[in-house]
Amino acid sequence: MDFDSIKQALQNNGCSFAIIARALNKSHASIRQVATRQNTSKKIAQAISIGVGKPIKEVFPENPAYHIENRFENKAEQEAYWHKQLVS
């Protein structure tokens, strides 16, 4: 989806870049930069996709990094997993 389509879909769903920015504690500019493909952030792209009501693959088809499921919720979980695997 292009920027205008994303913006329109958000409005149709009662959402906006400003709402997403406040929810994620990010700047409005950061949200717009991801929507316009000037910057990348999987977390922001996921939030935009939720607001649009479509899978991330449909909203950002050109960015395969967004399509990969996260194996770990956070860095501590990732490190604990690998520590267990490598030390065992």
Image (cartoon, rainbow, N blue to C red):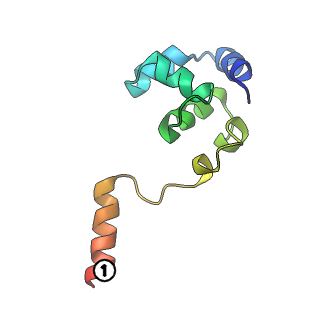
Q: Position of residue 21 (x, y in %)?
A: 45, 21
Amino acid type, residue under disc 1 in the picture: Leu
Residue 41 drawn above or below residue 36: below
Residue 12 drawn above or below residue 42: above
What residue is shown at x 61% (from left), y 15% (from top)? 14
Q: Depth check: 78 or 2 in front?
A: 2
Say which residue label 1 marks.
Answer: 86
The image quadrant where one finds the C terminus is bottom left
Residue 70 drawn above or below residue 47: below
Q: Position of residue 28 (x, y in %)?
A: 47, 16
What residue is shown at x 68% (from left), y 23% (from top)? 6
Q: Residue 60's image quarter?
A: top right
What residue is shown at x 58% (from left), y 50% (from top)? 65
Q: Position of residue 39 (x, y in %)?
A: 53, 32
| Element class at badge 1 | helix
The image quadrant where one finds the N terminus is top right
Q: Position of residue 53 (x, y in %)?
A: 66, 31
Q: Residue 87's image quarter?
A: bottom left
What residue is shown at x 55% (from left), y 21% (from top)? 32
For label 1, the crowd category at 10 Å Cα-Cα, with few meaning under 14, some 14 to 19 and many 20 or more, is: few
